[in-house]
Image (cartoon, rainbow, N blue to C red):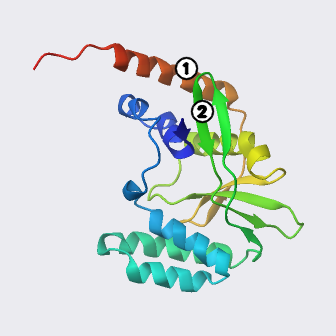
């Protein structure tokens, strides 16, 4: 079983062989560079104290994360300034199945809009903007899993650093199924390739 981020990475990178071999790995919090800021975003929404949560994570994060986290905190505070305080923090995990691959899909949070409906938000925290392929894949998987996560919600990929919402969905089902087929071939070949003698 794969996480949403691990699967999307395999659709938008040249390092497919290495990623395909590890796509079934479980999430490892200690290797997640953005774990603290993601937790602070959720904590701030839970308490309705976004500024306090951002101040706290910036004061406690390691020096090598400070500038990166500052940019994310600034972007997040610009975003939530126009958001409703009604936020769902803990959402169920949905699953997208194709062939023998299952992808876990969990929105980070859901924010209620003025019309009473919700945006199911996946936070994008990386330095570079999301590629068109990564955006399309993420939104497609969110949409397919939404009946399990939060029925009726609008899938949103939020580029936090740049305070940019991505919501436009393309029909990429055939492309993603082809990606799964390619990944299955890569994994089969890597498993069956004999190792060279030392």
**Which quarter of the rendering shows the N terminus?**
top right
Element under disc 1: helix
Q: Which residue is mark 2?
A: 102
- Horizontally, is 153 left or right of 59 in the view? right
Q: Which residue is mark 1?
A: 181
Q: Residue furthest left?
A: 198
Left or right: residue 7 versus residue 173 is left
- Residue 59 percent across, percent down from the top left: 40, 83
How packed mark 2 is, by other alpha carbons closer than 10 Å (few <14, some 14-19, many 20 or more), is some
Quick check: 178 left or right of 85?
Answer: left
Asked whether residue 169 appears in the rendered view, the answer is no
Location of residue 25 with respect to 55 vertically, above or below: above
Residue at 59% x, 75% y is 43
Q: Residue at x 60, y 67 (%)?
A: 163
Q: Residue at x 46, y 68 (%)?
A: 36
**Depth-wise, is mark 2 or mark 1 nearer the camera?**
2
User: Does residue 114 appear left or right of residue 138 in this picture?
Assistant: right
Query: Which mark, by number, is residue 193?
Result: none
Crowd tier of the residue under label 1, counting other residues whose Cα lies within 10 Å: few below 14, some 14–19, many 20 or above = some
User: Residue 108, relative to residue 19: is it above or below?
Assistant: below
Percent x, y of residue 150: 78, 53
Element type at mark 2: strand
| Residue 40 shows in this picture | yes
The picture places residue 173, in percent across and down from the top left corner, at: 69, 29
Image quarter of residue 95: top right
Total numbered circles: 2
Residue 131 to residue 89: above or below: above
């Amino acid at each position: 079983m794969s996480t949403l981020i691990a699967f999307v990475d395999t659709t938008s990178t040249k390092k497919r062989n290495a990623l395909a071999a590890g796509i079934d790995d479980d999430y490892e919090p200690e290797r997640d560079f953005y774990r603290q800021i993601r937790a602070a975003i959720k904590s701030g929404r839970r308490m309705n104290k976004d500024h306090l949560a951002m101040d706290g994570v910036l004061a406690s994060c390691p020096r090598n994360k400070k500038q990166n986290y500052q940019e994310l905190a600034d972007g997040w505070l610009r975003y939530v300034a126009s958001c409703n305080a009604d936020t769902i923090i803990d959402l169920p995990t949905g699953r997208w199945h194709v062939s023998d691959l299952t992808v876990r899909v969990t929105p980070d949070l859901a924010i209620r809009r003025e019309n009473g409906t919700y945006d199911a938000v996946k936070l994008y925290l990386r330095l570079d903007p999301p590629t068109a392929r990564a955006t399309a894949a993420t939104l497609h998987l969110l949409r397919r899993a939404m009946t399990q996560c939060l029925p009726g919600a609008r899938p949103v990929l939020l580029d936090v650093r740049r305070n940019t919402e991505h919501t436009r969905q393309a029909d990429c089902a055939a492309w993603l199924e082809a990606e799964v087929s390619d990944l299955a071939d890569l994994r089969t070949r890597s498993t069956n390739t004999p190792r060279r003698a030392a």
